């Protein structure tokens, strides 16, 4: 009986005063991320298609969405800020997405990103800007932006593949363009994070037509390794430049 009591006492002391050098005892995270992806493409989450052009309805809808998420203890919103070569805030770099007004390049009478940040912070929630990086949309979508689309303005850094347009990851201007977008967002808005989506080559990448750029920039490297290095270089640059700003 005494040995059992002694064992229990040792266990109690061990649990109450954990050994700092023991790897099994780690501090609990101070904050859990309970996040939701809030999709703006095609109005899947916000704004509704029926609310296009109706600012009051769009804003009330977002408030209702955030209230419902707050009620289940979601604390982080990942808001799709760059959709397909277009954005949901007034930008000097890319056109405004049509999801709010129904017209390519036409902004509503308010700034949706600024509004979403304000409403999230009012509820004690973080807002992270979610950017789709490499895809630019199908041909019809890109044509909707006409001369404001990236393939129209900078065709050499874009590639058409299987009925859609993509930024060419190997082209040096791709990282520069994405970097400018990220700097624009981080310097102008009080976002709590940046998320990159589709920061990769498209599906069926074996057929992706980048042989010419591989010859030009590949420096004799294996195609697959060269592609991996292209994506890594973009991610590294964006990370470092974001940290320099904020």
Image (cartoon, rainbow, N blue to C red):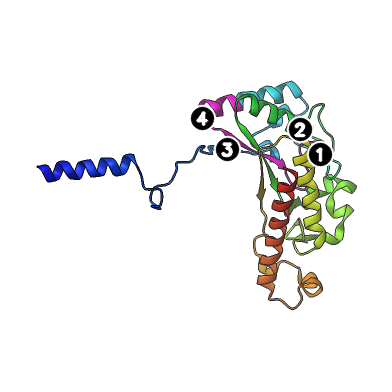
* Residue 124 visible: yes
Q: Earlier in the sequence, mark 4 or mark 1?
A: 4
Q: Viewer-nearest of labels 3 and 1?
A: 3
Q: Quadrant of the C terminus?
A: top right
Q: Viewer-nearest of labels 4 and 3?
A: 4
Whole-angstrom CA distance, mark 2 to mark 4, is 28 Å
* Residue at the image point whose x is 66% and y is 66% from the top: 228
Residue 73 marker: 4
Q: Nearer the viewer, residue 150 or 227?
A: 227
Direction from residue 150 to residue 48 in the image, left or right: left
Whole-angstrom CA distance, mark 4 to mark 1, is 32 Å
Residue range in magenta is 66-89
Q: Earlier in the sequence, mark 3 or mark 2?
A: 3
Residue found farthest to the left: 1
* Residue at the image point whose x is 25% and y is 44% from the top: 11
Q: Secondary structure at mark 1?
A: loop
Q: Secondary structure at mark 4?
A: loop
Residue 48 x, y percent position in the rendering: 68, 31
Residue 36 marker: 3
Q: Nearer the viewer, residue 15 or 239?
A: 15
Residue 207: quadrant of the picture: bottom right
CB within 8 Å, label 2 to label 1: yes
Whole-angstrom CA distance, mark 3 to mark 1, is 23 Å
Q: Secondary structure at mark 2?
A: loop
Residue 70 x, y percent position in the rendering: 55, 27
Q: Residue 1, relative to residue 74: is it above or below?
A: below
Magenta span contains residue 141: no
Residue corresponding to mark 1: 96
* Residue 62 visible: no
């Amino acid at each position: 009986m005494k040995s059992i009591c002694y064992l229990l006492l040792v266990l109690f002391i061990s649990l109450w005063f954990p050994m700092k050098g023991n790897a099994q005892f780690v501090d609990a995270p101070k904050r859990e991320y309970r996040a939701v992806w809030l999709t703006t493409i095609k109005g899947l989450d916000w704004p509704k298609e029926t609310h296009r052009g109706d600012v009051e309805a769009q804003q009330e809808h977002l408030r209702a969405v955030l209230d419902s998420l707050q009620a289940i203890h979601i604390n982080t919103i990942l808001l799709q800020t760059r959709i397909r070569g277009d954005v949901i805030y007034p930008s000097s770099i890319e056109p405004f997405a049509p999801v709010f007004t129904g017209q390519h390049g036409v902004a509503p009478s308010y700034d949706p990103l600024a509004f979403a940040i304000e409403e999230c912070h009012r509820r004690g929630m973080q807002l992270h800007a979610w950017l789709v990086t490499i895809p630019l949309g199908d041909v019809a979508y890109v044509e909707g932006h006409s001369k404001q689309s990236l393939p129209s303005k900078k065709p050499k850094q874009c590639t058409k593949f299987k009925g859609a347009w993509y930024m060419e990851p190997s082209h040096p201007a791709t990282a520069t363009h994405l970097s400018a977008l990220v700097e624009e967002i981080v310097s102008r808005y009080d976002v709590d994070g940046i998320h990159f989506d589709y920061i990769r080559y498209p599906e069926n990448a074996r057929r992706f037509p980048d042989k010419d750029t591989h010859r030009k920039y590949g420096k004799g490297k294996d195609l697959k390794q060269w592609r991996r290095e292209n994506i890594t270089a973009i991610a590294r640059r964006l990370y470092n430049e974001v940290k320099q700003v904020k």
